[in-house]
Image (spheres, helix red, strand yellow):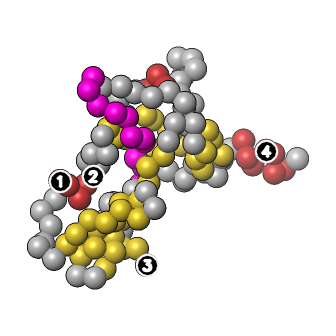
Amino acid sequence: MLLVGLAAWAQQYSLTYQGYPFLYRTSCEYPTFAAGDHLTLSAGKPSIAGKEFTGWLYDGTLYQPAQKFIMPAKDVVLLPIFDNEWPTAIDQQQTPDDSRKVLENGVLFLINNGVKYSIMGERVQ
């Protein structure tokens, strides 16, 4: 019983589809989730005339509609990607000539001086 009571007080985090909040909302309230919750992303696909929806980008990984997703211990904003155009923090920054972007198994990384970084700027081992 104690564990059930503790779970009810677990920190809650939001999941937002950037520009398309209606895709997950089932009422006037936005749902919240606990870290580790197993979710199924919305099967809905946003559309822009003349562009093909590629998927939802989060933390360097591209997710497809209705794909399984495990909620991290932070709020999540899923960014819609069209025509494989990945607008990332890397694209917004000036990068040295010896830097390059690589896509590995659907995850985008920046390689700078032989060191791999996530699109969030975190060093990856």
Amino acid carrying label 1: it is: Gln
Above or below 53: residue 59? below
Q: Earlier in the sequence, mark 2 or mark 3?
A: 2
Front in this rendered view, residue 56 or 21: 56
Q: Which residues are magenta?
A: 49-59
What residue is disc 1 on? 92
Q: Could you tell me if the residues under marks 4 and 3 are in contact, i.e. CB atoms within 8 Å?
A: no
What is the CA distance from the residue labelled 4 to the residue labelled 3? Answer: 38 Å
Q: Could you tell me if the residues under marks 3 and 1 are in contact, i.e. CB atoms within 8 Å?
A: no
What is the CA distance from the residue labelled 2 to the residue labelled 1? Answer: 7 Å
Q: Could you tell me if the residues under marks 2 and 1 are in contact, i.e. CB atoms within 8 Å?
A: yes
Amino acid carrying label 4: it is: Gly
Please identify the residue farthest to the bottom as the structure is shown. Answer: 114
Where residue 111 appears, as percent x and y from the top left, is 28, 73
Res. 5 mark:
4
What residue is disc 2 on? 88
Q: Could you tell me if the residues under marks 2 and 4 are in contact, i.e. CB atoms within 8 Å?
A: no
Judged from the image, the secondary structure of the residue bearing numbered disc 1 is helix
Amino acid carrying label 3: it is: Gln
What is the CA distance from the residue labelled 3 to the residue labelled 1? Answer: 24 Å
